[in-house]
Image (spheres, grey):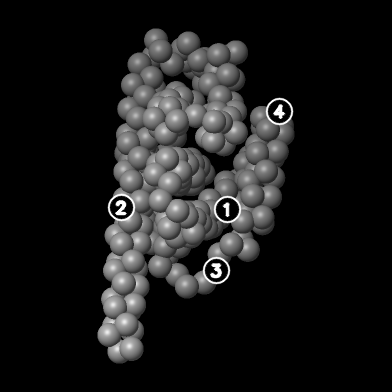
Amino acid sequence: MAQFETVRRTGAGVRTEQIDAGLRAHMNKVYGLMSVGMLLTAGVAWGVGTTPALLAIFRDPITLAPNMLGWVAMFAPLLMAFAFGAMINRISAAAAQMLFYTFAAVMGLSISWIFVAFTGISIAQTFLVTSIAFAGLSLWGYTTKKDLSGWGTFLMMGVIGLIVAMIINIFLQSPAIMFAVSILGVLIFAGLTAYDTQAIKVEYLQHAHMGDQEWLEKSAIMGALRLYLDFINMFMFLLQFLGQRE
């Protein structure tokens, strides 16, 4: 009996170690994919934003007001994010990864104007601040014992409210509304960073025993997209406070 208990506990310990190792590998893949996406976004944004001839295709060189193609570029990432969620279960993991990288490149195109509107130093400083905040929030979401699942509905309602307010303010051009949206945006996506990190971890732990490699690969890509969106949105809202206008 004692030998049986020892074997059982040893077996349980091995399974726990395997799950822990798998979780670390899964999270590393999520952060790795996210990092590649961020590099693509930064490269496209810098390439277009620092090339007047390319930026002029999408925006007025003086006022930076978007033209027809500019509006398409502005809303394309939002539509692609919804399409990504709808298609993820119908396409292969390789196709999903390519779609994510395409999305990251289009996002770079949509925010390329910041390199004309703000100084390069303030963009770099804001990116550094966002990186530090993101790392801290994501680490907390990963390690905390507090159940953050209850935040989901509240945060998603906040995101929808932000989108509606931003669309309305396109026509009103109210600095007060933009200021309020920026504050709420930073807080909402800060919360989503912690919430999404924990959710990615929990989803892996719930499905790891199934051994579905295809699901795990797609889950990592979807997790990378979620954290990527948290980072890029937090960065853009912080830029409204920390960015120095050209």
User: Residue 241, image x and y in percent?
Assistant: 49, 46
Residue sticking out furthest to the front: 1
Answer yes or no: do the residues labelled 3 and 2 have beta carbons within 8 Å? no
Sooner in the amino-acid sequence: mark 2 or mark 1: 2
Q: Is residue 113 found left or right of 23 in the rendered image?
A: right
Sooner in the amino-acid sequence: mark 3 or mark 1: 3
What distance separates the C-alpha of mark 2 from that of mark 4?
46 Å
| Residue found 29% across the figure and 78% down from its top | 7
Judged from the image, the secondary structure of the residue bearing numbered disc 1 is: helix
Judged from the image, the secondary structure of the residue bearing numbered disc 2 is: helix
User: Residue 147, image x and y in percent?
Assistant: 55, 68
What distance separates the C-alpha of mark 3 from that of mark 2?
23 Å
Judged from the image, the secondary structure of the residue bearing numbered disc 3 is: loop
**Residue that carries the numbered disc 2 in the rendered image:** 25
**Residue that carries the numbered disc 1 in the rendered image:** 188
Judged from the image, the secondary structure of the residue bearing numbered disc 4 is: helix
What distance separates the C-alpha of mark 3 from that of mark 4?
40 Å
Answer yes or no: do the residues labelled 4 and 1 have beta carbons within 8 Å? no
Figure quadrant of the N terminus: bottom left
| Residue found 49% across the figure and 26% down from its top | 110
**Residue that carries the numbered disc 4 in the rendered image:** 171
| Residue found 32% across the figure and 36% down from its top | 36
**Residue that carries the numbered disc 3 in the rendered image:** 147
Which circle, 2 or 4, is nearer the viewer?
2
User: Residue 237, image x and y in percent?
Assistant: 51, 44
Q: Amino acid at mark 2?
A: Ala
Packing grade of label 1 (10 A; few <14, some 14-19, many >=20) is many
Sooner in the amino-acid sequence: mark 4 or mark 1: 4
